Image: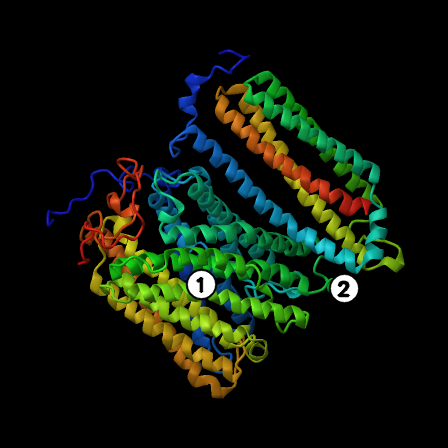
Amino acid sequence: MNAKIVEPREHFLNEGYSVRSWLLTRDHKRIAILFLISITLFFIVGGTAAVIFRLDLMTPEADLVQSETYNKLFTIHGVTMVFFFLIPSIPAVFGNFLVPLMIGAKDLAFPRINLLSWYIYVLGGVFTLWAILSGGVDTGWTFYTPYSSTYSNTHVMATAIGIFIVGFSSILTALNFIVSIHTMRAPGMTWFRLPLFIWSTYATSLIVVLGTPVLAIVLALVAVERGLRIGIFDPALGVDPLLFQHLFWFYSHPAVYIMILPGMGVISEVVPCFSRKPIFGYSFVAFSSLGIALLGFLVWGHHMFVSGQSPYAAAVFSLLSFSVAIPSAIKVFNWTATLFQGWVSYATPMLYSLGFIGLFTIGGLTGMFLATLAVDVHVHDTYFVVAHFHYIMVGGMVMAYMAALHFWWPKMTGRLYPEAWGRLSALVIFLGFNLTFFPQFLLGYLGMPRRYHVYPPEFQVLNVMSSAGASILAVGYLLPLVYLSWSLKYGRLSGDNPWHATGLEWQTTSPPPTENFQHPPRVTRGPYEYDGPECQHAQ
Amino acid sequence: MSTTDLSANTRNDATDLQPQFANLAQQHVAGQLGMWVFLVTELMFFGGMFCSYTIYRGRYFEAFRAGSEHLKIALGTTNTAVLLGSSLTVALAVRAAKSGRRSLVVGWLLATIVLGTTFLVIKFTEWGLEYHESLLPGWAFSFEEKYLPEAQLFFSLYFIMTGVHGLHMIIGVAAWLCLTAWVWRVDASNRRATAIEITGLYWHFVDIIWIFLFPLLYLI
């Protein structure tokens, strides 16, 4: 068992080194890597914007940038992080890489459409970067009308077009996943033998397919109104300004589930592996993904409690928003039950996953506060909301992304990252994150509005804490960039299955061959049989 | 290369199979499911506009009805017949493709292209007429005083909805042109029949959108 680990002779990375072989690839694994590089670039763009405005927020006055610039900075932060990082992240990188492997197929159903999806992403990104570089946009990532459609003097149209385009990237990826999961599972891979990552990816893809087109049309209408001066959201024509908000949030609420569901799928893979136990309540977790997808479409009005919508509608949305917490809670309970009496070990992916469970729970619970009508009147549009969604998106989703990155890094590259640095970074990120965002709950509750450039001096201490935390968080994100890149050349060879994990992706070489499997797999057992005889204890 | 009956195409079946699929049946099912999923996204895309239109029609009933009366029902009805006819020619093309009769396939596809183009020509003519009647929303818009400003909203929605529909028609006609050229030159019957079937689904969907658009805008 301690035979020297050798890198496989032929695998997807060394089959062709030319630029052409990468830019014209049909291999889902190479496309995943292309996405990995692209979304990292946008993460840096969005993160840089945050660094600048968090620096400015260290003082109550507007002293680092002008107010118009400040508005552009938080808009760009939101737009790039939501549409160009979070939404693609796990599906476009790990979904693309893992879905065919996990279902036992040679590739996705439509490899060329997969590549097209990446090019569309790049095109949308170029539009948006152009908008940023030529002056930015200041409407907030939510583009509320009539400011965005009529009054803003910034590059709304270019940004709207950029997001419109990148939406199609999302749709094509989701379409590919749905078709592949339905039609290309290996013999013996029944639905209930699928890894939960696949269930999550499938549910995410359903949301993308149903919701993203609505965003597309609403942004197209804003662009048409600005470009052709045809009134759609113009109050002078008798249009309700809420029309935009309803259409926008009909997508953008499910969008947050697009962002978090894949992360939950990752946790469902990592936790059983590092507890050496099958997941507790497999079907509950599987169905809860579908439940989140369904209920997620019914709650959009909770973003509009103080907008002037009917109070009866608000009450219904509030009740439904309480219900949507239930499937998420089911997952948290099942992960916890999986840990119980397991042989728990604390490799980097597991540290990130445990962090996810805690921070996502806090974020989710604060969502219940926001779903409560009376409380929301007080904290709507304050830093309480900002803290809530960052706990879920950064404390939850980005940590899940990091967990996935570390868990499947050996599979994708054939190399191990340095474990000590991995654990250190996880700790730095965890501490930096909490220092950044916990004060924001307090700030919001005390009344500091979001998107404000200046604030009353009594809020300065909490703001300084938050900005200090942001600098620690930045260091925490830079460390993996360095050591993961280092490991590509100098990391120890990983072998096929360094974590002794179950799942079809671990039954092939690291990195996998282009056609994924030397011999087409046949599946005869369930997905998390960690008590099985061939699974040894990790490390 | 034979130009007529291609039904005995077993020697080509091996080249029809894309490498990621296990067998032709899987490939066919995947292609169909892919197009259906795409059509769901298209439904949601148009759905936003249909929803907005319906709500505002309910709110501003008089103004919208007045606006609707300025639309050319004769041209709209002709277009409906043209589009339904083109769906028929598509269905016939699919049937011909399944039995491998290439020249018949090409014939029906060309008929579809002609009908689709006819639809677009009539639509552009309609828009031209509306432009001359100052019904284009914007600074040149003029309408009876008592229905302003909401009548302009009707025309905004009308132009955008028929415009987006027209764009989908143009894409459809372009797809048929490419497909007809491919069928004419390339000898791959299984993929050909599947491709025609899948594009046919798209075309039928665009037709159905018009079937809803026409009464909503013109008739009621």
Give the labeled residue for mark 2.
A236
Residue A440 in the image: state x and y as whole percent: 45, 78
Q: Residue at x 32, y 56 (%)?
A: A269
Is residue B109 visible in the rendered structure shown here?
no
Q: Chain of mark 2?
A: A
How far apart in space, not on screen, are marks 1 and 2 (Cα)? 36 Å
Amino acid beneath label 1? Gly
Image coords of residue A36 (percent x, y): 37, 52
Does residue A194 sit above or below A234 in this rendering?
Answer: above
**Is there a contact, CB below 8 Å, between mark 1 and mark 2?**
no
Q: Secondary structure at mark 2?
A: helix
Residue A335 rendering spot, x and y as whole percentages: 34, 64
Circle 2: residue type? Ala
Which residue lies under the disc numbered 1? A46
Identified at 55% across, 42% down, the residue is B38
- Drawn side of residue A14 relative to residue B80, left or right: left
Residue sitting nearer the eye, B220 or A87: B220
Label 1 marks a residue whose chain is A
For mark 1, give the secondary structure.
Answer: helix
- In primary-sequence order, the first of circles 1 and 2 is 1
A125 horizontally vs B20: left or right: right
Residue B55 position by quadrant: bottom right
| Relative to A243, residue A441 above or below | below
How many callouts does the rendering have?
2
* Residue at left offset 61%, top offset 49%: B45
Mark 1 burial class by Cα count in 10 Å: few <14, some 14-19, many 20+: many
